[in-house]
Image (cartoon, grey):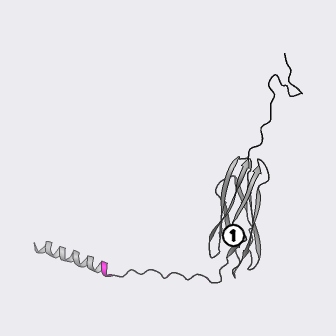
Amino acid sequence: MKKVLLSICLLIAATAITNAQETTTPAPTPPNPNAPEISFETETHDFGKLAKGAPCEFEFKFTNTGKEPLIITNCSATCGCTVPNWPKEPIMPGKTGVIKVKYDSNRVGAFQKDVTVTSNGKTSSKKVTIKGTIDAPPKEEQFPGNNTGNGAPVQK
């Protein structure tokens, strides 16, 4: 009985000692006040209505408003119908750059596509958006009857 009571006391003491120890968390690193920052002239572009197959490209212009070189590590679109192209070299403070976004306009209907821009900036991830509507081409009128495509229909 004494052994059981002693075991319980040791268990309680070990639990109390474990809970009493403080866990230390590392202090968060303060943000870099000189970090680069990507600032877009516009973050959304509306193409409006376009014909199917029409060119559908836009250049998002930006400036590095920080004090260190801006490095864009990736630009990813929400689907394969949107292709971004970005500068691979660092953008120096105060300098500008362009992210070109091309949409495959062979799809009919409304669209809204986001491109996520990942960089070493204060805000490491930003989104730019393109949107619009692709109109279906008009259907060609066909005459009734035997139409060979070489003139007026032939009547029998």
Query: Which residue is located at x 71 percent, y 57 percent?
Result: 83
Query: What secondary structure predominates along the stretch shown in magenta?
Result: loop
Q: Is residue 22 magenta?
A: yes
Measuring from the top left, give residue 151's x and y in whole percent.
Answer: 89, 27
Q: Nearer the viewer, residue 115 or 21?
A: 115
Q: Is residue 156 magenta?
A: no
Residue at x 63% of width, y 84% of height: 33
Residue 23 in percent (x, y) is at 39, 80
Judge left or right: residue 28 versus residue 104. left
Instruction: Give x and y (percent) for residue 122.
Output: 62, 76
How many callouts does the rendering have? 1
Please say if 134 is above or below 123.
above
Task: Identify the amino acid type marked 1.
Answer: Ile
- Reading the image, the residue beneath label 1 is 72
| Residue that sits furthest to the top in the current view | 156
Give 114 or 155, whichever is nearer the viewer.
155
Say above or below: 96 vs 50: below
Dot 1: within a 10 Å radius of its alpha carbon, few (fewer than 14), some, or many (20 or more) residues?
Answer: many
* Local secondary structure at mark 1: strand
Image height of 137 relative to 58, above or below: above
Relative to 93, residue 54 above or below: above
Question: Which segment is the magenta one?
Answer: 18-32
Task: Name the residue: 69% across, 80% down.
Answer: 66
At a point 72% along the width and 62% down the height, the residue shown is: 45
* Quarter assignment of residue 58: bottom right
Residue 1 on image: x %, y %: 10, 72
Single out the residue that lies furthest toward the left: 1
Quadrant, the C terminus = top right
